[in-house]
């Protein structure tokens, strides 16, 4: 019985490898691409066809090629480039500030239970209060300029990275810490060589969430009180009924989000070569 | 003083009047009661007993991970408290750091003790070779099987060249075949390294196969701990008559037949 089973397996394997390897790999690649991006491609095609053939009003949902040319014109004339630059600056500064404050604070809070206990209620209160509801408060305190916009983005961006860092530190396997202690590791060595590397994947979950939040809040802040930036451009184009430009700005925002996420995932995979790669 | 002593003393453990109990819903559960024990330098002592008899607690006290309520532990004649450089622990789980390669994991113990990385890694390579994982030095822990990971843990403990190796059910999580191989390997490592080994196990055959003496702990307050000599030639053969007789005798200690 066992022999038979083994035999049939061998035949199957050798039969498969007799096929030309290159075509097989090409087919596998195509299958993979289709299963991953097929639905997205279908959605875009449906959009294009629906708009071109008039199933939906092209003035509300312009065909993709019109949007693409609006995007191209905006970038070539430099108008959208300025918007991208100012938007990147706002969300970039806010994100960087959240990271620089959130990660060290999270590492500290996660390790000292008393600090975490004392700070947790106020953190939960702040976190549950919508940053957008607080935006008017920030405007009153900081004025209508750049500071209040950056601050509201910072505020919303801080919590994901802070809470993920605290969680990462708290969930470090106690058994690994105990192992390090049996070799005489000092508390600093335990932190540097066990707690910190163990928290990295969790910190990255927070970073990716924070990056998404930064772009989300960016749009809201720019829609309320700005005269530049991609968020402003979306609103402004809609007011002026420049619908292709509006969609071009929306696609740019989506692109920014995808790029930010891609960079963070690449960085995480580089830092965490030991773990199974993240997608 | 001990540095001048000949090596007969090295790795000698004395336990005097050791007691330890745990708080358990307002009452206290006493797991070790006034235990005395002498472990000779270079011997393998196995500790067996039913769960809750305190065998793991005893090992953790010896490791310095827990402190006793009463009594003391002397190593080479000196009372010890806390962890120490002359001891290394092998746990039931390999406890490898997933973000370090096999080589880096094995060198970890030396590195946290302040040995320069290059030197630590050189010695680590020697012990990786000893446990037969030379080709896996650059592998990540997630790529290893359970038995291989436990070998890495053993190599890491050996790399700090301890006088005393404390093993807490080191093969308890491995499948039966791997377990037998690992026991053979541990016997070989012991022959080559001459280190004192204190081995907690629930596997009586493992105890007989490896140990010079077996300490039988019980949960019963009136029943003191008993030491049994395993007077069998090495390397040991599980099917040999003396081995089988010893197994029967140990089973009888637990009221099994």
Image (cartoon, coloured by chain):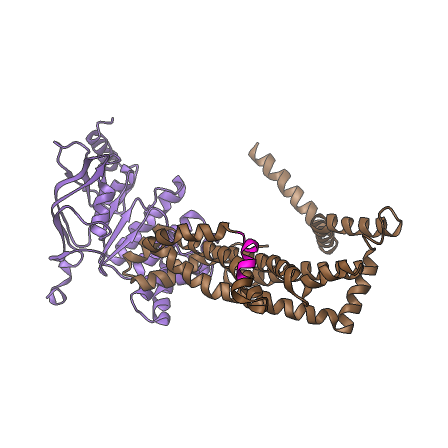
Query: Relative to residue B63, is residue A64 drawn left or right?
Result: right
x, y percent for residue A74:
77, 68
Q: Quadrant of the N terminus of chain A?
A: top right
- Majority secondary structure in the magenta region: helix
Q: Colour of chain A?
A: brown
Query: Relative to residue A105, is residue A143 drawn left or right?
Result: right
Q: Quadrant of the C terminus of chain A?
A: bottom right
Please give the name of the residue rendered at 78% of the width and 62% of the height, measured from the top-left corner. A245
Please give the name of the residue rendered at 45% of the width and 64% of the height, measured from the top-left corner. A101
Q: Nearer the viewer, residue B121 or A263?
A: A263
Residue B161 visible in the displayed image:
yes
User: Is A133 within the magenta?
Assistant: yes
Residue at the right extreme, as displayed: A53
Query: Relative to residue A125, is residue A7 drawn left or right?
Result: right
x, y percent for residue A145:
59, 69
Q: Nearer the viewer, residue B15 or A238?
A: A238
Query: Relative to residue A221, is residue A20 drawn left or right?
Result: right
User: Is A240 within the magenta?
Assistant: no
Q: Colour of chain B?
A: purple
x, y percent for residue B216:
19, 38
Segment colored magenta: A130-138
Please give the name of the residue rendered at 78% of the width and 73% of the height, measured from the top-left corner. A77
x, y percent for residue B45:
21, 46
Q: Nearer the viewer, residue A94 or A278?
A: A94
Residue B144 visible in the displayed image:
no
**Rendered view: B251 above or below A190:** above
């Amino acid at each position: 019985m066992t022999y038979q089973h083994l035999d049939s397996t061998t035949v199957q394997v050798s039969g498969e490898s007799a096929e030309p390897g290159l075509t097989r790999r090409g087919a596998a690649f195509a299958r993979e691409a289709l299963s991953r991006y097929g639905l997205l491609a279908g959605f875009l095609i449906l959009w294009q066809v629906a708009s071109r053939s008039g199933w939906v009003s092209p003035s509300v949902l312009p065909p993709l090629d019109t949007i693409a040319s609006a995007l191209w014109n905006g970038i070539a004339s430099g108008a959208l480039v300025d918007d991208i630059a100012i938007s990147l600056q706002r969300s970039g500064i806010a994100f960087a500030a959240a990271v620089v404050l959130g990660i060290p604070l999270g590492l500290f809070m996660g390790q000292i239970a008393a600090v975490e206990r004392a700070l947790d209620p106020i953190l939960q209160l702040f976190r549950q209060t919508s940053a957008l509801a607080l935006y008017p408060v920030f405007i009153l305190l900081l004025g209508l300029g750049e500071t209040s916009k950056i601050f509201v983005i910072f505020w919303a961006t801080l919590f994901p990275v802070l809470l993920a860092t605290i969680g990462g530190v708290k969930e470090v396997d106690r058994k690994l810490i105990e192992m390090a202690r049996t070799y005489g590791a000092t508390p600093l060595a335990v932190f540097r060589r066990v707690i910190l590397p163990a928290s990295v994947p969790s910190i990255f979950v927070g970073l990716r969430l924070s990056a998404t939040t930064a772009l989300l809040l960016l749009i809201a802040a720019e829609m309320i009180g700005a005269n530049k930036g991609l968020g402003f451009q979306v609103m402004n184009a809609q007011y002026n009924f420049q619908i292709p430009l509006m969609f071009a700005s929306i696609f740019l925002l989506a692109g920014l989000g995808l790029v930010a996420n891609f960079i963070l995932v690449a960085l995480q995979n580089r830092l965490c070569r030991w773990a199974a790669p993240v997608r | 003083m001990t540095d001048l002593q000949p090596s007969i003393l090295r790795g000698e453990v004395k336990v005097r009047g050791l007691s330890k109990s745990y708080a358990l819903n307002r009452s206290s559960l006493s797991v070790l009661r006034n235990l005395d024990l002498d472990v000779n330098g270079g011997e393998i002592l196995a500790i067996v007993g039913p769960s809750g008899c305190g065998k793991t607690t005893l090992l953790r006290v010896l490791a310095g991970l827990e402190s006793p309520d009463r009594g003391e532990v002397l190593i080479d004649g000196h009372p010890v408290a806390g962890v120490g450089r002359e001891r290394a622990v092998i746990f039931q789980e390999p406890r490898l750091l997933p973000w370090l390669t096999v080589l880096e994991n094995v060198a970890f113990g030396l590195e946290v003790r302040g040995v320069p990385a290059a030197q630590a890694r050189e010695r680590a390579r020697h012990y990786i070779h000893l446990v037969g994982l030379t080709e896996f030095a650059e592998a990540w822990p997630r790529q290893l099987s359970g038995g291989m990971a436990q070998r890495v843990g053993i190599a890491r403990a050996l790399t700090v060249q301890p006088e005393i190796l404390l093993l807490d059910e080191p093969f308890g999580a491995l499948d039966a075949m791997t377990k037998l191989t690992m026991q053979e390997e541990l016997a070989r490592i012991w022959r080559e390294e001459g280190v004192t080994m204190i081995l907690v196990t629930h596997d009586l055959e493992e105890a007989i196969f490896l140990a010079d003496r077996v300490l039988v702990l019980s949960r019963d307050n009136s029943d003191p701990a008993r030491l049994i000599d395993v007077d069998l030639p090495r390397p040991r053969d599980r099917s040999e008559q003396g081995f089988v007789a010893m197994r029967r005798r140990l089973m009888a200690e637990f009221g099994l037949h």
